[in-house]
Structure formats: structure tokens, C-alpha cells
Amino acid sequence: MKPRVLGVDPGSLSWDFFALDDDTIILDTSIPTKELIQDPQKAINIIRSVENIDLMVSPSGFGLPLKNVRDLTEKDIFFTLLKFNQKDKDKLIGLGEVLRLIKAQNIPGIIVPGVKHLPTIPRYRKINKIDMGTADKLCTALTGIRDQMERFNVAPKGTNFIMVEIGYGFTAVLAIENGQIIDGIGGSNIMGFRACGSLDGELAYLIKNIRKKNIYKGGVAYISGYSDLSLREITLLAERDEQTKTALKAYISSVKKAVFGIASSFSQKEKIVEVLLAGRGAELNYLRERMIRGLKDVAPVKIMKSYSQIAKRAAQGAAFIANGILGGRFEPIINNLKIKEASGSILDDIFIPFEKDKLIRDLD
């Protein structure tokens, strides 16, 4: 079979679209996220520009066990967004509206799992965790698996690496052993260029009413005092500004702790072949050089291969997933990842008291 597929990555700075007709790239584009917040129909226009799509991996947020967009309920959309209302304007609003438009226009799309839904991660690693990596991080990992398969001429089970995705807002770290995701640290748990990462419990108490906006702020850009600068501008500023240099040291320290920590999840340290960097920050010399030095005791560090000119690796991986689900050339990767066997809810195995039952009743 030669599927005609599309992958979408709903990023903090841009939404990326990557489509394949078998092995031929037929769409490779990106649009600023702020434009989609203002006009979600723009995403549909780009999707519709690819005729006769067999399957699209839709923007999936925190993900769901594999589900067709036409079957989505408002409860499902809440679980992809984890957002109660639209009073605080942010990128997730666009995601929800786009999903509703995809459903209304009967575009053949699916929602893919987040990392927590995967059966390849032991239950004990999921306890009191929600963000172990959103669905787009799963997609990026698939691009990394393809990269290693081609470079080392191995089957999916022969791929082993730690993935570090350095995004505009968030950073995430995943552990891939034998071609399967065995652990993940999501973007709300590691300092990012915009995101603060894990909140100190006592600080959370003092803040009192934690909202999404608290999660999206407090990272490198805010520590440096230049919250509107791009990743590249911040790294350039670090050469002469001590506060920005301190911000980046804090960031690199946070990432190193995550990588060293997740290395302990492998069955043996020798299984880790390399650390693969992805995301916007992976292309910046300032960060790449420091990651290479700081992580060399874990494994060699290299940039994950990109198969497009424009769309990020998450969009590429999303297209590869759609291809594999339809029985295309990436089916062995999909089967080994056990994406089809994903199950459960991101609220499973949460033992910290909160009004979970009321939340679910209100959604019903």
C-alpha cells in the first residue's frame, strides 16, 4: 500500500504540516501559532490543500488512546487540552477549535496517544504523572527511531537513545529502548525557554491559584528579563549579559538532570547508543556545544535527522505514524511502539488528592 498521509504538529511558536504520498513529500509548510489562534480556519485551508488524504494524524495535545476525530466528544477534547475555559488566551484554544473544524468537515483524521498512554512504560513510572510527553513528543521519537534505523541499518528493536526536544516554549526528554518508549519527562517538568518546569511545592503553595499561564512562564526568557526574544537572540545575548548567561546555565542544568535521571530507566546504561537533539534549540551552536559537553558521560550527542526543509520533526513523525497505521513502510515501527495498544486516561494512577471525580462528572 502507498498511503497518502498528513502529519500536524501544533507547536508553541508555529503549527507545522508535513504530507507524504508514499515516499514523496507533497506538503512541507509552517504557519505562526498566533495566526491560528486568530483564525483556526487557516489550518483547515492548509489541510484541504492536500487532496485525497487517506489519513491525517491530527493535532493531539496530551493525546488519547488511538481515536478517530469523527468520534471525538467534548470530553475527549478537554483531555487533549487539559484546559477548563477560554478566559486565558493561549495556543491551546486554537487546537480545540481546529479539532472541532476537522470533525465538522469530516476530514479523515486520528488522535494519537501521549506518552503516558503507552503500554511500554511500566505503571509505577506513571504514578502521579500526567505530562510524560505530549503526543507530538511521541511523533518526534518516531522520527528519531527512523533516523537510527537508517544510519545503523537495524530493525525498530535495534534503536536505543535518549531524545531531548528543545522547543520554543517547552523541553522534553524521552527514553527509547529497543525501539519502545520506556519513560518520559514532559515539558511541564523541565525548564524550557518559556516554561518554568517543575514547580517547587512550597512555591506552588504561595502562588495559590496555579493556572496555565504560570506553567508557560518563568523559564529562560523570563529569568533573563527578555521574555520577547527568540531562542537564537537569547543565546547571542548570553555572550555579554550575565543574567542571560545565568538563565541558560539554569536551563542546561535542568536538562542535564533530566537526561541523567532518565538514563536510569534503561535496563543497562550500555543500551544508550546516543542522545538525539531535536526541536528549534537543537540547531543553535551555543546549546548544542554545551549539551555535547554536559551529556558526554551518558552517551555521544548528535542532532536528529530531519526529513523536511520546513516542518519540524514532530510533524514528520506524525506523517510516518499515519503511514504505518495504514500498513505503509513504517508499520513495523508503529507495531513495535505499540501505539495501537495504548489505553487508559492521563488521570489514571493519580494519588495526590484533588476533585477528580467531580471533574469527570462535570465533563459527562
Image: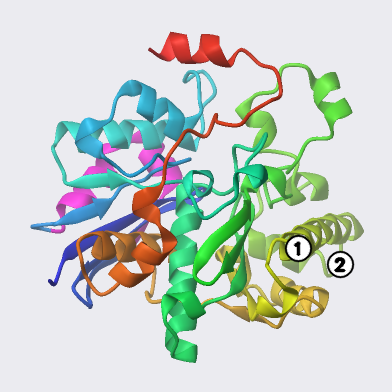
Q: Position of residue 111 (x, y in %)?
A: 33, 44
Disc 1 to disc 2, C-alpha distance: 37 Å
Was residue 49 drawn as part of the magenta stretch in this picture? yes
Q: Which residues are magenta?
A: 29-50
Q: Which mark is residue 264?
A: 1
Relative depth, front residue between 268 and 161: 268
Q: Residue furthest left?
A: 52
Q: Secondary structure at mark 2?
A: loop
Q: Is residue 36 above or below residue 232?
A: above
SS majority, magenta = helix
Crowding at label 1, few (<14), some or many (≥20) Cα neighbours within 10 Å?
few
Q: Quadrant of the N terminus?
A: bottom left
Q: Secondary structure at mark 1?
A: loop
Was residue 110 drawn as part of the magenta stretch in this picture? no
Q: Position of residue 221 (x, y in %)?
A: 73, 49
* Residue behind mark 2: 240
Q: Is residue 41 left or right of residue 65?
A: left
Residue 272 seen anywhere in this rendered image of the structure: no
Which residue sits at x=78%, y=35%?
Answer: 199
Relative depth, front residue between 270 and 22: 270
Q: Is residue 290 left or right of residue 143?
A: right
Q: Is residue 144 left or right of residue 253?
A: left
First reached walking from the N terminus: tag 1 or tag 2: 2
Which picture quadrant has residue 165?
bottom right
* Kind of residue at badge 1: Ser
Relative depth, front residue between 177 and 304: 177
Q: How is the image coloured?
A: rainbow
Q: Quadrant of the C terminus?
A: top left
Q: Position of residue 222 (x, y in %)?
A: 76, 44
Crowding at label 2, few (<14), some or many (≥20) Cα neighbours within 10 Å?
few
Which residue sits at x=32%, y=31%?
Answer: 97
